[in-house]
Image (cartoon, rainbow, N blue to C red):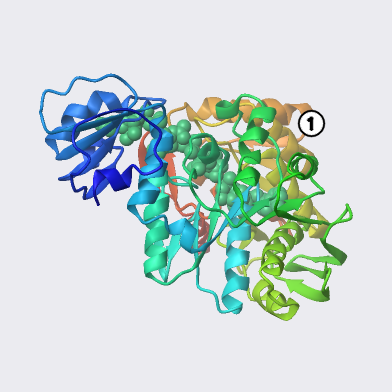
Amino acid sequence: MKIKNIIKGLEVEKIYGSLEKDIKGISYDSRKVGSNYVFVAIEGFESDGHKYIDQAIEKGATALVVTKDIKVDEENITVIKVKDTRDSLARISSNFYGNPSEKMKLIGVTGTNGKTSITYLVKSILEKANMKIGIIGTMGSVIGDELFNTSNTTPESLLIQEYLYHMIEEETKACVMEVSSHSLDLKRVEYCNFDIGIFTNLSRDHLDYHNTIENYFNAKLKLFYMTNKCNIINIDDIYGRRIVEETKDLDISTITYGIVEKATIYATDIEYHLNGVDFKLNTPKGSIDILFNIPGEFSVYNALAAASCAYYYGIGLNTIKEGLQSVKGIKGRFEIVPTNRDFSVIIDFAHTPDGLEKVLTTIRQFSEGRVVAVFGAGGNRDRTKRPIMGETVGKYADFLIVTSDNPRHEEPGRIVDDVIEGVKKVNKNYIKIVDRKEAIEYAIKNARSKDIILLAGKGHETYTIIGDEVLPFDERQIVLDILKKMEK
Ligand SMILES: CC(=O)N[C@H]1[C@@H](OP(=O)(O)OP(=O)(O)OC[C@H]2O[C@@H](n3ccc(=O)[nH]c3=O)[C@H](O)[C@@H]2O)O[C@H](CO)[C@@H](O)[C@@H]1O[C@H](C)C(=O)N[C@@H](C)C(=O)N[C@H](CCC(=O)O)C(=O)O
Ligand SMILES: Nc1ncnc2c1ncn2[C@@H]1O[C@H](COP(=O)(O)OP(=O)(O)OP(=O)(O)O)[C@@H](O)[C@H]1O
Ligand SMILES: N[C@H](CCC[C@H](N)C(=O)O)C(=O)O
Ligand SMILES: [Mg+2]
Protein backbone atom coordinates (compact mmCIF):
# COMPACT_ATOMS: atom_id res chain seq x y z
CA MET A 1 0.00 0.00 0.00
CA LYS A 2 1.27 3.47 -0.84
CA ILE A 3 2.25 5.78 2.02
CA LYS A 4 -0.31 8.35 0.88
CA ASN A 5 -3.05 5.79 1.46
CA ILE A 6 -1.69 4.61 4.78
CA ILE A 7 -1.74 8.14 6.20
CA LYS A 8 -5.32 8.93 5.18
CA GLY A 9 -7.01 10.77 8.04
CA LEU A 10 -3.73 11.25 9.89
CA GLU A 11 -3.17 14.64 11.50
CA VAL A 12 0.22 15.54 10.10
CA GLU A 13 2.50 18.42 11.14
CA LYS A 14 5.20 18.08 8.50
CA ILE A 15 6.15 15.66 5.74
CA TYR A 16 9.59 15.20 4.15
CA GLY A 17 10.01 12.91 1.17
CA SER A 18 7.83 10.95 -1.17
CA LEU A 19 4.37 9.56 -0.33
CA GLU A 20 4.32 7.32 -3.41
CA LYS A 21 6.46 4.52 -1.94
CA ASP A 22 4.96 1.11 -1.51
CA ILE A 23 4.87 -0.04 2.11
CA LYS A 24 4.98 -3.72 3.08
CA GLY A 25 4.41 -3.46 6.81
CA ILE A 26 4.33 -1.33 9.95
CA SER A 27 6.32 -1.68 13.17
CA TYR A 28 6.67 0.34 16.37
CA ASP A 29 9.55 -1.89 17.47
CA SER A 30 12.84 -1.34 15.61
CA ARG A 31 13.75 -4.99 16.20
CA LYS A 32 10.77 -6.18 14.20
CA VAL A 33 11.15 -3.85 11.19
CA GLY A 34 11.34 -5.49 7.74
CA SER A 35 12.11 -4.33 4.25
CA ASN A 36 9.99 -1.35 3.08
CA TYR A 37 8.35 -0.85 6.45
CA VAL A 38 7.02 2.24 8.21
CA PHE A 39 8.65 2.60 11.63
CA VAL A 40 6.53 4.45 14.19
CA ALA A 41 8.65 5.96 16.99
CA ILE A 42 6.85 5.97 20.33
CA GLU A 43 8.03 7.73 23.47
CA GLY A 44 7.31 5.04 26.04
CA PHE A 45 7.51 4.62 29.81
CA GLU A 46 10.80 2.76 29.72
CA SER A 47 12.40 3.88 26.51
CA ASP A 48 11.99 6.11 23.46
CA GLY A 49 11.45 4.69 19.97
CA HIS A 50 13.23 7.73 18.49
CA LYS A 51 16.48 6.27 19.86
CA TYR A 52 16.14 3.29 17.54
CA ILE A 53 15.56 5.06 14.24
CA ASP A 54 18.98 4.11 12.88
CA GLN A 55 18.36 0.46 13.65
CA ALA A 56 14.92 0.69 12.02
CA ILE A 57 16.44 2.13 8.84
CA GLU A 58 19.16 -0.49 8.84
CA LYS A 59 16.50 -3.19 8.98
CA GLY A 60 14.63 -1.74 6.03
CA ALA A 61 12.35 1.10 7.15
CA THR A 62 11.71 3.51 4.29
CA ALA A 63 9.31 5.77 6.18
CA LEU A 64 9.27 7.09 9.73
CA VAL A 65 6.44 8.49 11.83
CA VAL A 66 7.87 10.66 14.60
CA THR A 67 6.97 13.36 17.11
CA LYS A 68 10.45 14.88 17.36
CA ASP A 69 12.59 16.82 14.90
CA ILE A 70 15.05 14.22 13.75
CA LYS A 71 17.99 14.25 11.37
CA VAL A 72 18.20 11.35 8.96
CA ASP A 73 21.46 10.94 7.03
CA GLU A 74 20.02 8.65 4.40
CA GLU A 75 18.21 10.22 1.53
CA ASN A 76 15.12 8.48 0.33
CA ILE A 77 13.59 8.10 3.78
CA THR A 78 10.15 9.65 4.15
CA VAL A 79 9.66 11.39 7.50
CA ILE A 80 6.19 12.19 8.76
CA LYS A 81 6.00 14.36 11.86
CA VAL A 82 2.87 14.12 13.99
CA LYS A 83 1.72 15.19 17.45
CA ASP A 84 1.00 11.76 18.87
CA THR A 85 2.58 8.60 17.52
CA ARG A 86 0.35 6.19 19.55
CA ASP A 87 -2.71 7.76 17.92
CA SER A 88 -0.97 7.71 14.53
CA LEU A 89 -0.05 4.05 14.92
CA ALA A 90 -3.73 3.23 15.44
CA ARG A 91 -4.77 5.33 12.42
CA ILE A 92 -2.23 3.93 9.96
CA SER A 93 -2.67 0.35 11.21
CA SER A 94 -6.41 0.55 10.62
CA ASN A 95 -5.82 2.01 7.13
CA PHE A 96 -3.16 -0.59 6.30
CA TYR A 97 -5.49 -3.48 7.14
CA GLY A 98 -8.44 -1.94 5.26
CA ASN A 99 -10.27 -0.58 8.33
CA PRO A 100 -11.53 -4.05 9.30
CA SER A 101 -13.60 -2.89 12.29
CA GLU A 102 -15.93 -1.10 9.86
CA LYS A 103 -16.74 -4.41 8.21
CA MET A 104 -17.82 -6.26 11.33
CA LYS A 105 -19.78 -6.18 14.54
CA LEU A 106 -17.24 -5.11 17.15
CA ILE A 107 -18.21 -5.40 20.81
CA GLY A 108 -15.98 -3.84 23.48
CA VAL A 109 -16.12 -4.99 27.12
CA THR A 110 -14.63 -2.85 29.87
CA GLY A 111 -14.70 -2.76 33.69
CA THR A 112 -12.46 -4.02 36.50
CA ASN A 113 -13.73 -7.60 36.73
CA GLY A 114 -15.72 -9.93 34.49
CA LYS A 115 -14.44 -8.88 31.04
CA THR A 116 -12.89 -12.19 30.01
CA SER A 117 -15.83 -14.14 31.39
CA ILE A 118 -18.32 -12.04 29.43
CA THR A 119 -16.39 -12.37 26.15
CA TYR A 120 -16.70 -16.17 26.33
CA LEU A 121 -20.41 -15.96 27.18
CA VAL A 122 -21.10 -13.59 24.28
CA LYS A 123 -19.18 -15.90 21.96
CA SER A 124 -21.21 -18.90 23.08
CA ILE A 125 -24.57 -17.18 22.55
CA LEU A 126 -23.69 -15.62 19.19
CA GLU A 127 -22.42 -18.98 17.95
CA LYS A 128 -25.75 -20.55 18.86
CA ALA A 129 -27.27 -17.86 16.62
CA ASN A 130 -24.95 -19.08 13.83
CA MET A 131 -22.62 -16.09 13.94
CA LYS A 132 -18.89 -16.76 13.70
CA ILE A 133 -17.19 -14.68 16.38
CA GLY A 134 -13.61 -13.88 17.35
CA ILE A 135 -12.18 -12.85 20.71
CA ILE A 136 -9.39 -10.48 21.72
CA GLY A 137 -8.52 -10.57 25.43
CA THR A 138 -6.56 -11.78 28.43
CA MET A 139 -6.54 -15.44 27.42
CA GLY A 140 -5.32 -14.54 23.92
CA SER A 141 -7.05 -13.95 20.64
CA VAL A 142 -9.37 -16.45 19.04
CA ILE A 143 -9.48 -16.29 15.24
CA GLY A 144 -11.42 -19.16 13.68
CA ASP A 145 -10.34 -22.25 15.60
CA GLU A 146 -6.93 -20.89 16.52
CA LEU A 147 -5.78 -19.24 19.72
CA PHE A 148 -3.01 -16.65 19.53
CA ASN A 149 -1.28 -15.80 22.78
CA THR A 150 -0.87 -12.12 23.50
CA SER A 151 1.02 -10.52 26.36
CA ASN A 152 -1.53 -7.80 27.00
CA THR A 153 -5.27 -8.10 27.64
CA THR A 154 -5.83 -5.49 24.91
CA PRO A 155 -2.90 -5.64 22.50
CA GLU A 156 -1.25 -2.68 20.74
CA SER A 157 -3.35 -1.11 17.95
CA LEU A 158 -1.22 -2.64 15.20
CA LEU A 159 -1.95 -6.15 16.46
CA ILE A 160 -5.64 -5.44 17.06
CA GLN A 161 -6.06 -4.29 13.45
CA GLU A 162 -4.09 -7.26 12.14
CA TYR A 163 -6.26 -9.68 14.13
CA LEU A 164 -9.47 -8.00 12.97
CA TYR A 165 -8.22 -8.22 9.38
CA HIS A 166 -7.60 -11.97 9.76
CA MET A 167 -11.05 -12.39 11.31
CA ILE A 168 -12.60 -10.79 8.24
CA GLU A 169 -10.48 -13.09 6.03
CA GLU A 170 -11.85 -16.06 7.99
CA GLU A 171 -15.36 -14.70 7.45
CA THR A 172 -15.67 -13.97 11.15
CA LYS A 173 -17.92 -10.96 11.06
CA ALA A 174 -18.11 -10.30 14.80
CA CYS A 175 -15.49 -9.81 17.46
CA VAL A 176 -15.81 -9.34 21.19
CA MET A 177 -12.81 -7.54 22.65
CA GLU A 178 -11.73 -6.81 26.21
CA VAL A 179 -10.92 -3.13 26.39
CA SER A 180 -8.61 -2.39 29.31
CA SER A 181 -8.28 1.06 30.83
CA HIS A 182 -4.63 1.10 29.72
CA SER A 183 -5.67 0.48 26.14
CA LEU A 184 -8.14 3.35 26.21
CA ASP A 185 -5.56 5.67 27.72
CA LEU A 186 -2.74 4.52 25.42
CA LYS A 187 -4.92 4.73 22.30
CA ARG A 188 -4.66 1.06 21.39
CA VAL A 189 -8.37 0.97 20.43
CA GLU A 190 -8.48 4.34 18.67
CA TYR A 191 -10.27 4.17 15.26
CA CYS A 192 -11.98 0.93 16.24
CA ASN A 193 -15.54 1.12 15.09
CA PHE A 194 -17.43 -0.29 18.10
CA ASP A 195 -21.06 -1.33 17.67
CA ILE A 196 -21.51 -2.01 21.35
CA GLY A 197 -19.76 -1.16 24.61
CA ILE A 198 -20.36 -3.27 27.74
CA PHE A 199 -19.57 -2.02 31.25
CA THR A 200 -19.11 -4.58 34.04
CA ASN A 201 -18.12 -2.73 37.22
CA LEU A 202 -15.38 -0.52 38.62
CA SER A 203 -13.39 -1.09 41.79
CA ARG A 204 -9.88 -0.64 43.04
CA ASP A 205 -7.10 -1.67 40.63
CA HIS A 206 -4.38 -0.19 38.46
CA LEU A 207 -3.79 2.91 40.59
CA ASP A 208 -0.08 2.49 39.86
CA TYR A 209 -0.98 3.65 36.36
CA HIS A 210 -4.01 5.92 36.82
CA ASN A 211 -3.16 7.35 40.28
CA THR A 212 -6.80 8.01 41.16
CA ILE A 213 -10.04 6.06 40.80
CA GLU A 214 -11.49 9.09 39.01
CA ASN A 215 -8.80 8.92 36.30
CA TYR A 216 -9.36 5.16 36.06
CA PHE A 217 -13.10 5.76 35.63
CA ASN A 218 -12.54 8.46 33.01
CA ALA A 219 -10.35 6.11 30.99
CA LYS A 220 -13.12 3.47 31.00
CA LEU A 221 -15.77 6.09 30.21
CA LYS A 222 -14.05 6.83 26.89
CA LEU A 223 -15.33 3.56 25.42
CA PHE A 224 -18.94 4.66 25.79
CA TYR A 225 -18.33 7.74 23.64
CA MET A 226 -16.73 5.59 20.94
CA THR A 227 -19.65 3.20 20.41
CA ASN A 228 -21.99 3.64 17.45
CA LYS A 229 -25.03 1.60 18.35
CA CYS A 230 -25.53 0.64 21.95
CA ASN A 231 -24.06 0.93 25.44
CA ILE A 232 -24.82 -1.93 27.84
CA ILE A 233 -24.39 -0.88 31.44
CA ASN A 234 -24.54 -2.57 34.87
CA ILE A 235 -26.55 -0.05 36.85
CA ASP A 236 -26.14 -1.80 40.17
CA ASP A 237 -22.64 -0.36 40.05
CA ILE A 238 -22.37 3.28 41.03
CA TYR A 239 -19.95 3.97 38.18
CA GLY A 240 -22.37 2.29 35.79
CA ARG A 241 -25.05 4.76 36.84
CA ARG A 242 -22.58 7.58 36.22
CA ILE A 243 -21.89 6.31 32.70
CA VAL A 244 -25.61 6.25 31.94
CA GLU A 245 -25.90 9.83 33.20
CA GLU A 246 -22.82 11.09 31.34
CA THR A 247 -23.86 9.54 28.02
CA LYS A 248 -27.59 10.23 28.16
CA ASP A 249 -27.52 12.86 25.39
CA LEU A 250 -25.69 10.64 22.90
CA ASP A 251 -27.62 9.49 19.89
CA ILE A 252 -27.31 5.75 20.62
CA SER A 253 -29.28 3.15 22.59
CA THR A 254 -28.59 2.25 26.18
CA ILE A 255 -29.51 -1.12 27.65
CA THR A 256 -29.14 -1.33 31.41
CA TYR A 257 -28.79 -4.58 33.36
CA GLY A 258 -28.83 -5.46 37.02
CA ILE A 259 -30.37 -7.31 39.90
CA VAL A 260 -31.05 -4.56 42.42
CA GLU A 261 -31.89 -1.46 40.36
CA LYS A 262 -34.74 -1.41 37.87
CA ALA A 263 -32.98 -2.25 34.62
CA THR A 264 -33.93 -3.12 31.01
CA ILE A 265 -32.58 -6.66 31.43
CA TYR A 266 -32.67 -8.05 34.95
CA ALA A 267 -32.53 -11.24 36.97
CA THR A 268 -35.05 -12.51 39.53
CA ASP A 269 -35.64 -15.80 41.35
CA ILE A 270 -31.91 -16.36 41.87
CA GLU A 271 -30.97 -19.69 43.43
CA TYR A 272 -27.39 -20.36 44.34
CA HIS A 273 -25.63 -23.75 44.19
CA LEU A 274 -22.01 -24.80 44.50
CA ASN A 275 -22.06 -25.95 40.88
CA GLY A 276 -23.87 -22.98 39.38
CA VAL A 277 -26.67 -20.50 39.73
CA ASP A 278 -30.27 -20.56 38.49
CA PHE A 279 -32.19 -17.40 37.70
CA LYS A 280 -34.96 -15.94 35.63
CA LEU A 281 -33.73 -13.70 32.82
CA ASN A 282 -36.23 -10.87 32.27
CA THR A 283 -36.25 -8.75 29.12
CA PRO A 284 -38.80 -6.40 27.54
CA LYS A 285 -39.61 -9.29 25.17
CA GLY A 286 -40.29 -11.86 27.88
CA SER A 287 -38.60 -13.99 30.52
CA ILE A 288 -36.82 -17.33 30.55
CA ASP A 289 -35.28 -19.58 33.22
CA ILE A 290 -31.53 -20.08 33.03
CA LEU A 291 -29.49 -22.85 34.69
CA PHE A 292 -26.01 -21.35 34.61
CA ASN A 293 -22.96 -23.53 35.26
CA ILE A 294 -20.67 -21.00 36.96
CA PRO A 295 -21.67 -20.15 40.54
CA GLY A 296 -22.04 -16.83 42.31
CA GLU A 297 -23.94 -13.61 42.05
CA PHE A 298 -21.10 -12.20 39.95
CA SER A 299 -21.86 -14.88 37.37
CA VAL A 300 -25.45 -13.66 37.14
CA TYR A 301 -24.10 -10.19 36.28
CA ASN A 302 -21.79 -11.62 33.62
CA ALA A 303 -24.64 -13.65 32.13
CA LEU A 304 -26.92 -10.59 32.11
CA ALA A 305 -24.28 -8.55 30.28
CA ALA A 306 -23.86 -11.20 27.60
CA ALA A 307 -27.63 -11.71 27.31
CA SER A 308 -28.11 -7.94 26.86
CA CYS A 309 -25.67 -7.93 23.97
CA ALA A 310 -27.47 -10.81 22.27
CA TYR A 311 -30.82 -9.16 22.97
CA TYR A 312 -29.63 -6.00 21.21
CA TYR A 313 -28.82 -8.07 18.11
CA GLY A 314 -32.34 -9.48 18.13
CA ILE A 315 -31.37 -13.00 19.23
CA GLY A 316 -34.32 -14.89 20.74
CA LEU A 317 -34.58 -15.91 24.38
CA ASN A 318 -34.33 -19.65 23.68
CA THR A 319 -31.06 -19.15 21.82
CA ILE A 320 -29.73 -16.94 24.61
CA LYS A 321 -30.61 -19.66 27.09
CA GLU A 322 -28.92 -22.32 24.97
CA GLY A 323 -25.79 -20.19 24.59
CA LEU A 324 -25.50 -19.43 28.31
CA GLN A 325 -26.25 -22.97 29.44
CA SER A 326 -23.80 -24.58 27.07
CA VAL A 327 -20.88 -22.84 28.81
CA LYS A 328 -19.68 -25.56 31.19
CA GLY A 329 -16.92 -23.41 32.65
CA ILE A 330 -14.22 -20.90 31.76
CA LYS A 331 -10.58 -21.79 32.38
CA GLY A 332 -9.35 -20.40 35.70
CA ARG A 333 -12.72 -18.87 36.62
CA PHE A 334 -14.09 -20.77 39.60
CA GLU A 335 -12.45 -23.88 38.16
CA ILE A 336 -12.84 -26.90 40.41
CA VAL A 337 -9.80 -29.22 40.35
CA PRO A 338 -10.83 -32.84 40.77
CA THR A 339 -9.00 -34.23 43.84
CA ASN A 340 -10.92 -37.40 44.70
CA ARG A 341 -10.48 -36.45 48.34
CA ASP A 342 -12.82 -35.17 51.02
CA PHE A 343 -11.70 -31.57 50.44
CA SER A 344 -12.02 -29.30 47.37
CA VAL A 345 -9.60 -27.12 45.43
CA ILE A 346 -10.78 -24.16 43.35
CA ILE A 347 -8.56 -22.17 40.98
CA ASP A 348 -9.80 -18.62 40.35
CA PHE A 349 -8.38 -15.50 38.69
CA ALA A 350 -9.53 -13.10 41.45
CA HIS A 351 -6.72 -10.56 41.74
CA THR A 352 -8.53 -7.48 43.04
CA PRO A 353 -10.20 -6.82 46.42
CA ASP A 354 -13.63 -6.93 44.76
CA GLY A 355 -12.95 -10.13 42.81
CA LEU A 356 -11.68 -11.82 45.99
CA GLU A 357 -14.73 -10.70 47.94
CA LYS A 358 -17.05 -12.00 45.22
CA VAL A 359 -15.43 -15.40 44.91
CA LEU A 360 -14.99 -15.90 48.66
CA THR A 361 -18.57 -14.92 49.54
CA THR A 362 -19.72 -17.38 46.87
CA ILE A 363 -17.63 -20.15 48.45
CA ARG A 364 -18.83 -19.19 51.94
CA GLN A 365 -22.44 -19.69 50.88
CA PHE A 366 -21.80 -23.44 50.57
CA SER A 367 -18.77 -24.25 52.68
CA GLU A 368 -19.26 -26.82 55.39
CA GLY A 369 -15.62 -26.93 56.48
CA ARG A 370 -12.92 -24.25 56.54
CA VAL A 371 -12.27 -21.86 53.66
CA VAL A 372 -8.50 -21.77 53.09
CA ALA A 373 -7.12 -19.11 50.72
CA VAL A 374 -3.74 -19.29 49.00
CA PHE A 375 -3.11 -15.94 47.37
CA GLY A 376 -0.73 -13.03 46.79
CA ALA A 377 -0.43 -9.93 44.64
CA GLY A 378 1.41 -9.23 41.41
CA GLY A 379 4.69 -7.29 41.34
CA ASN A 380 5.05 -4.03 39.39
CA ARG A 381 1.31 -3.49 39.66
CA ASP A 382 -0.92 -1.41 41.94
CA ARG A 383 0.56 -1.54 45.48
CA THR A 384 -2.40 0.16 47.10
CA LYS A 385 -4.63 -2.84 46.46
CA ARG A 386 -2.33 -5.27 48.31
CA PRO A 387 -3.31 -4.59 51.96
CA ILE A 388 -6.95 -4.29 50.91
CA MET A 389 -6.72 -7.71 49.26
CA GLY A 390 -5.21 -9.05 52.51
CA GLU A 391 -7.95 -7.49 54.61
CA THR A 392 -10.71 -8.75 52.30
CA VAL A 393 -9.43 -12.32 52.27
CA GLY A 394 -8.96 -12.10 56.05
CA LYS A 395 -12.60 -11.14 56.39
CA TYR A 396 -13.98 -14.08 54.41
CA ALA A 397 -11.48 -16.97 54.73
CA ASP A 398 -10.78 -19.03 57.85
CA PHE A 399 -7.11 -19.59 57.17
CA LEU A 400 -4.81 -17.59 54.87
CA ILE A 401 -1.62 -18.67 53.17
CA VAL A 402 -0.07 -15.51 51.82
CA THR A 403 2.29 -16.20 48.95
CA SER A 404 3.64 -14.90 45.62
CA ASP A 405 1.84 -14.10 42.36
CA ASN A 406 4.04 -13.02 39.43
CA PRO A 407 6.67 -11.02 41.39
CA ARG A 408 8.04 -9.55 38.14
CA HIS A 409 10.83 -7.12 39.17
CA GLU A 410 9.88 -6.75 42.84
CA GLU A 411 11.24 -8.62 45.85
CA PRO A 412 8.57 -11.33 46.48
CA GLY A 413 8.86 -11.26 50.29
CA ARG A 414 8.12 -7.53 50.34
CA ILE A 415 4.98 -7.91 48.23
CA VAL A 416 3.77 -10.63 50.62
CA ASP A 417 4.44 -8.28 53.57
CA ASP A 418 2.35 -5.55 51.89
CA VAL A 419 -0.55 -8.03 51.72
CA ILE A 420 -0.03 -9.17 55.32
CA GLU A 421 -0.29 -5.57 56.52
CA GLY A 422 -3.98 -5.78 55.61
CA VAL A 423 -4.43 -9.31 56.99
CA LYS A 424 -3.27 -8.07 60.40
CA LYS A 425 -6.17 -5.63 60.54
CA VAL A 426 -8.68 -8.46 60.80
CA ASN A 427 -6.87 -10.74 63.21
CA LYS A 428 -7.15 -13.98 61.23
CA ASN A 429 -4.86 -17.00 61.28
CA TYR A 430 -2.34 -16.77 58.50
CA ILE A 431 1.01 -18.11 57.42
CA LYS A 432 3.58 -16.55 55.08
CA ILE A 433 5.04 -18.96 52.53
CA VAL A 434 6.69 -16.93 49.76
CA ASP A 435 7.21 -19.88 47.38
CA ARG A 436 3.80 -20.47 45.78
CA LYS A 437 4.37 -24.16 45.11
CA GLU A 438 5.26 -24.71 48.77
CA ALA A 439 2.22 -22.68 49.77
CA ILE A 440 -0.08 -24.90 47.72
CA GLU A 441 1.62 -28.00 49.13
CA TYR A 442 1.11 -26.72 52.68
CA ALA A 443 -2.59 -26.10 52.01
CA ILE A 444 -3.14 -29.56 50.58
CA LYS A 445 -1.06 -31.46 53.15
CA ASN A 446 -2.88 -29.75 56.00
CA ALA A 447 -6.36 -29.95 54.46
CA ARG A 448 -9.11 -31.19 56.73
CA SER A 449 -12.28 -32.94 55.74
CA LYS A 450 -14.72 -30.59 53.89
CA ASP A 451 -12.16 -27.78 53.54
CA ILE A 452 -12.39 -25.65 50.40
CA ILE A 453 -8.97 -24.45 49.27
CA LEU A 454 -9.05 -21.40 47.01
CA LEU A 455 -5.96 -20.78 44.87
CA ALA A 456 -6.56 -17.17 43.85
CA GLY A 457 -4.86 -14.84 41.39
CA LYS A 458 -3.44 -16.99 38.65
CA GLY A 459 -6.57 -18.45 37.08
CA HIS A 460 -5.80 -19.56 33.52
CA GLU A 461 -2.12 -18.59 33.76
CA THR A 462 0.19 -21.56 33.34
CA TYR A 463 3.33 -19.57 34.10
CA THR A 464 4.90 -17.35 36.68
CA ILE A 465 6.74 -14.13 35.85
CA ILE A 466 9.99 -13.62 37.77
CA GLY A 467 12.00 -10.64 36.53
CA ASP A 468 11.61 -10.81 32.77
CA GLU A 469 11.49 -14.58 32.80
CA VAL A 470 8.25 -16.45 32.17
CA LEU A 471 8.58 -19.85 33.86
CA PRO A 472 6.15 -22.79 33.66
CA PHE A 473 3.68 -22.85 36.58
CA ASP A 474 0.42 -24.67 36.07
CA GLU A 475 -1.53 -24.86 39.32
CA ARG A 476 -3.75 -27.69 38.08
CA GLN A 477 -0.72 -29.84 37.44
CA ILE A 478 0.94 -28.76 40.68
CA VAL A 479 -2.11 -29.82 42.69
CA LEU A 480 -2.27 -33.20 40.94
CA ASP A 481 1.49 -33.77 41.45
CA ILE A 482 1.21 -33.00 45.17
CA LEU A 483 -1.74 -35.37 45.55
CA LYS A 484 0.14 -38.11 43.71
CA LYS A 485 3.23 -37.61 45.86
CA MET A 486 1.08 -37.91 48.97
CA GLU A 487 -0.28 -41.27 47.80
CA LYS A 488 3.20 -42.80 47.76
C1 LIG B 1 2.51 0.62 30.84
C2 LIG B 1 2.22 0.00 29.53
O1 LIG B 1 1.11 -0.36 29.24
N1 LIG B 1 3.28 -0.16 28.69
C3 LIG B 1 3.07 -0.67 27.36
C4 LIG B 1 3.85 0.20 26.40
O2 LIG B 1 5.20 0.07 26.70
P1 LIG B 1 6.14 1.34 26.78
O3 LIG B 1 5.43 2.53 26.24
O4 LIG B 1 6.65 1.46 28.16
O5 LIG B 1 7.33 0.93 25.81
P2 LIG B 1 8.90 1.20 26.01
O6 LIG B 1 9.53 -0.05 26.49
O7 LIG B 1 9.13 2.46 26.75
O8 LIG B 1 9.37 1.42 24.50
C5 LIG B 1 9.02 2.60 23.76
C6 LIG B 1 9.02 2.26 22.30
O9 LIG B 1 10.38 1.94 21.89
C7 LIG B 1 10.34 0.79 21.11
N2 LIG B 1 11.64 0.10 21.12
C8 LIG B 1 12.17 -0.33 22.29
C9 LIG B 1 13.38 -1.01 22.30
C10 LIG B 1 14.05 -1.25 21.07
O10 LIG B 1 15.12 -1.85 20.98
N3 LIG B 1 13.47 -0.77 19.94
C11 LIG B 1 12.29 -0.11 19.93
O11 LIG B 1 11.81 0.27 18.88
C12 LIG B 1 9.21 -0.03 21.71
O12 LIG B 1 8.72 -1.02 20.81
C13 LIG B 1 8.17 1.05 21.99
O13 LIG B 1 7.38 1.31 20.86
O14 LIG B 1 3.63 -0.26 25.08
C14 LIG B 1 4.01 -1.64 24.87
C15 LIG B 1 3.70 -1.98 23.42
O15 LIG B 1 2.36 -1.84 23.15
C16 LIG B 1 3.23 -2.56 25.81
O16 LIG B 1 3.61 -3.90 25.63
C17 LIG B 1 3.48 -2.12 27.23
O17 LIG B 1 2.70 -2.94 28.09
C18 LIG B 1 3.39 -3.42 29.24
C19 LIG B 1 4.17 -4.69 28.88
C20 LIG B 1 2.42 -3.75 30.36
O18 LIG B 1 2.74 -4.48 31.27
N4 LIG B 1 1.22 -3.22 30.32
C21 LIG B 1 0.15 -3.53 31.30
C22 LIG B 1 0.22 -2.63 32.52
C23 LIG B 1 -1.18 -3.37 30.59
O19 LIG B 1 -1.27 -2.74 29.54
N5 LIG B 1 -2.21 -3.95 31.16
C24 LIG B 1 -3.54 -3.85 30.57
C25 LIG B 1 -4.63 -4.26 31.55
C26 LIG B 1 -4.49 -5.59 32.22
C27 LIG B 1 -5.82 -6.05 32.83
O20 LIG B 1 -6.15 -5.65 33.92
O21 LIG B 1 -6.49 -6.88 32.20
C28 LIG B 1 -3.62 -4.68 29.29
O22 LIG B 1 -4.42 -4.34 28.41
O23 LIG B 1 -2.87 -5.68 29.18
N1 LIG C 1 -18.80 -9.50 37.36
C1 LIG C 1 -17.86 -9.70 38.26
N2 LIG C 1 -17.76 -8.91 39.35
C2 LIG C 1 -16.80 -9.11 40.27
N3 LIG C 1 -15.89 -10.08 40.21
C3 LIG C 1 -15.93 -10.89 39.13
C4 LIG C 1 -16.91 -10.75 38.11
N4 LIG C 1 -16.70 -11.70 37.19
C5 LIG C 1 -15.62 -12.39 37.58
N5 LIG C 1 -15.16 -11.92 38.76
C6 LIG C 1 -13.98 -12.35 39.53
O1 LIG C 1 -12.85 -11.76 38.89
C7 LIG C 1 -11.98 -12.76 38.36
C8 LIG C 1 -11.51 -12.35 36.99
O2 LIG C 1 -12.60 -12.43 36.07
P1 LIG C 1 -12.36 -12.09 34.54
O3 LIG C 1 -11.12 -12.74 34.10
O4 LIG C 1 -13.61 -12.35 33.81
O5 LIG C 1 -12.13 -10.51 34.69
P2 LIG C 1 -11.34 -9.49 33.74
O6 LIG C 1 -12.09 -8.21 33.87
O7 LIG C 1 -11.20 -10.05 32.40
O8 LIG C 1 -9.92 -9.37 34.45
P3 LIG C 1 -8.56 -8.72 33.79
O9 LIG C 1 -8.64 -7.26 34.08
O10 LIG C 1 -7.43 -9.34 34.49
O11 LIG C 1 -8.57 -9.00 32.34
C9 LIG C 1 -12.79 -14.04 38.35
O12 LIG C 1 -11.97 -15.15 38.48
C10 LIG C 1 -13.73 -13.84 39.54
O13 LIG C 1 -13.08 -14.15 40.74
N1 LIG D 1 -4.35 -8.37 33.80
C1 LIG D 1 -4.05 -8.30 35.21
C2 LIG D 1 -3.73 -9.68 35.60
C3 LIG D 1 -3.24 -9.84 37.00
C4 LIG D 1 -3.00 -11.28 37.31
C5 LIG D 1 -2.17 -11.55 38.50
N2 LIG D 1 -1.74 -12.90 38.37
C6 LIG D 1 -0.98 -10.59 38.60
O1 LIG D 1 0.06 -10.90 38.02
O2 LIG D 1 -1.11 -9.58 39.28
C7 LIG D 1 -2.91 -7.34 35.46
O3 LIG D 1 -1.97 -7.34 34.69
O4 LIG D 1 -3.01 -6.57 36.39
MG1 LIG E 1 -9.54 -10.29 31.27
The kind of residue tagged 1 is Val
Residue 14's place in the image compared with 127, above or below, is: above
Image location of residue 237, percent across then percent down: 79, 45
Horizontal side, residue 253 vs residue 3: left or right = right
Give the number of callouts. 1
Image location of residue 97, percent across then percent down: 35, 55
Q: Nearer the viewer, residue 331 or 342?
A: 331
Residue 71 visible in the picture:
yes
Q: Residue at x 59, y 28 (%)?
A: 210
Q: Residue at x 53, y 57 (%)?
A: 479
Residue 444 visible in the picture:
no
Q: Nearer the viewer, residue 463 or 252?
A: 252
Image location of residue 117, percent across then percent down: 62, 58
Residue topped by disc 1: 426
Image location of residue 26, percent across then percent down: 28, 44
The answer to which quarter of the image holds residue 387 is top right
Q: Residues within 10 Å of mark 1 (few under 14, many from 20)?
A: some
**Quadrant of the picture in which ligand 3 is shown:** top right
Horizontal side, residue 203 vs residue 413: left or right = right
The answer to which quarter of the image holds residue 320 is bottom right
Horizontal side, residue 191 vs residue 417: left or right = left
Q: Residue at x 70, y 41 (%)?
A: 202
Residue 162's place in the image compared with 129, above or below, is: above
